[in-house]
């Protein structure tokens, strides 16, 4: 496995989303919190190609996983 560390902005780029920090914050704010029983890949806001990208990286145990996990955590975080 490659030990490359990808910043969160790179995940957004790979998903075809804006990688601007303001847009990333807006995306997370708009789509969170996900219910605890909803897996990141099953979230209703992904397109089929975005969902496929996320699934593919998990199955391959890819070097993207730490950043995908960070996105997952951010989207499941409960606002106070």
Image (cartoon, rainbow, N blue to C red):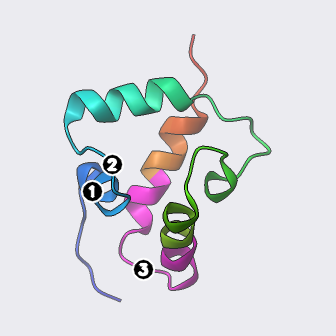
- Rendering coords of residue 14 (x, y %): 32, 63
Q: Which mark is residue 28?
A: none
Write the residue at 61% across / 23% down.
Answer: 78
Residue 17 marker: 2
Q: Mark 1 and mark 2 in contact (Cβ < 8 Å)? A: yes
Q: Is residue 78 magenta?
A: no
Q: Is residue 44 left or right of residue 70?
A: right
Q: Identify the secondary structure beneath mark 2.
A: loop
Compared across the picture, whether 46 is left or right of 18 comes to right
Q: Mostly what secondary structure, the magenta segment?
A: helix
Label 1: element kind: helix
| Closer to us: 70 or 14 | 14
Where does label 3 land, which residue? Answer: 62
Q: Residue at x 59, y 44 (%)?
A: 45
Assess disc 2: are there few (<14), some (14-19) or many (≥20) residues with their C-alpha within 10 Å of its C-alpha. Answer: some
Nearer to us: label 3 or label 2:
2
Residue located 33% across and 56% down the image: 16
Instruction: Tell me where the magenta segment starts and ends, as one range.
Output: 55-69
Q: Do the CB atoms of the residues marked 3 and 1 lie less than 8 Å apart?
A: no
| Residue at numbered disc 1 | 13
Looking at the image, residue 41 lies above or below residue 26:
below
Marks 2 and 1, Cα distance to the nearest angstrom? Answer: 5 Å
Residue 71 in percent (x, y) is at 45, 47
Return the x and y of residue 80 as percentages of the image width and height. Answer: 57, 10
C-alpha gap between disc 3 and disc 1: 16 Å
Question: Which residue is located at x 74 percent, y 35 percent?
Answer: 35
Magenta span contains residue 66: yes
């Amino acid at each position: 496995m490659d030990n490359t560390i990808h910043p969160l902005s790179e995940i957004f780029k790979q998903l075809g989303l804006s990688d601007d920090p303001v847009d990333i914050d807006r995306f997370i704010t708009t789509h969170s919190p996900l219910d605890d029983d909803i897996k990141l890949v099953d979230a209703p806001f992904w397109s089929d190609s975005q969902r496929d990208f996320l699934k593919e990286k998990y199955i391959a145990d890819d070097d993207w996983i730490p950043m995908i996990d960070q996105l997952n955590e951010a989207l499941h975080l409960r606002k106070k």
